[in-house]
Amino acid sequence: MRIYNRALSSSDVQSLFTETSSSSVPTSGLVGEWKFDGNTLDTSGAGNNGIGAASSCTLVTATASSSTCSIKYNPPANAGPVTITATYSGDGTHKTSSGTSALTVS
């Protein structure tokens, strides 16, 4: 999927329609390109990476009464507000938990 910040001309649309792996596609005004190949990375070079959900996170005991879990988060290239939400469904040792954090990418 590609998103442009301009209207495409008929020749642009024709280029996209007849695209092959060796052909060039219009890059003027290209905001993002996502190939849906198992990740949310923007392959256009604009850095508008999506945020994927972590499929798992292993709890590590921090203290006798708590555990922690970490994932790596890559913020989008564009400045603006971002909300991160995490949910843990619980297990035999730990209760369910969830939290939300707001941050601003600048």
Image (tube, grey):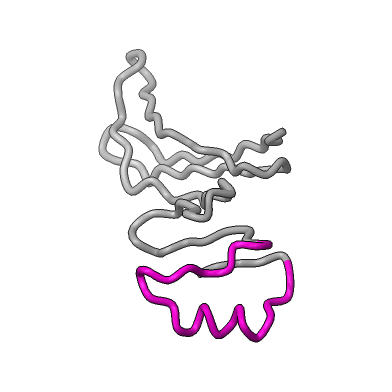
Residue at (67% x, 44% y) in the render:
78
Residue at (52% x, 79% y) in the render:
15
Which of 84/99 is in front?
84
Place residue 70 in its image quadrant.
top left
Residue 2 located within the stretch drawn in magenta:
no
Left or right, 49 with respect to 104, comes to: left
Estimate the x, y position of residue 85 in percent, counting from the top left: 54, 44
Which of 83/99 is in front?
83
Instruction: Write down the region rendered in magenta.
Output: 6-29
Estimate the x, y position of residue 52 in percent, counting from the top left: 45, 51
Estimate the x, y position of residue 32 in percent, counting from the top left: 57, 59
Report the label total. 0
Which of 65/28 is in front?
28
In the rendered image, the quadrant that contains the C terminus is top right
Residue 23 located within the stretch drawn in magenta:
yes
Left or right, 42 with respect to 104, comes to: left
Q: Looking at the image, is 17 positioned above or below residue 53?
A: below
* Dominant secondary structure, magenta: loop
Estimate the x, y position of residue 24 in percent, counting from the top left: 48, 68
Q: Looking at the image, is 74 positioned above or below residue 16?
A: above
Q: Looking at the image, is 27 positioned above or below residue 41?
A: below
Residue at (61% x, 78% y) in the render:
12
- Residue reaching furthest to the top: 63
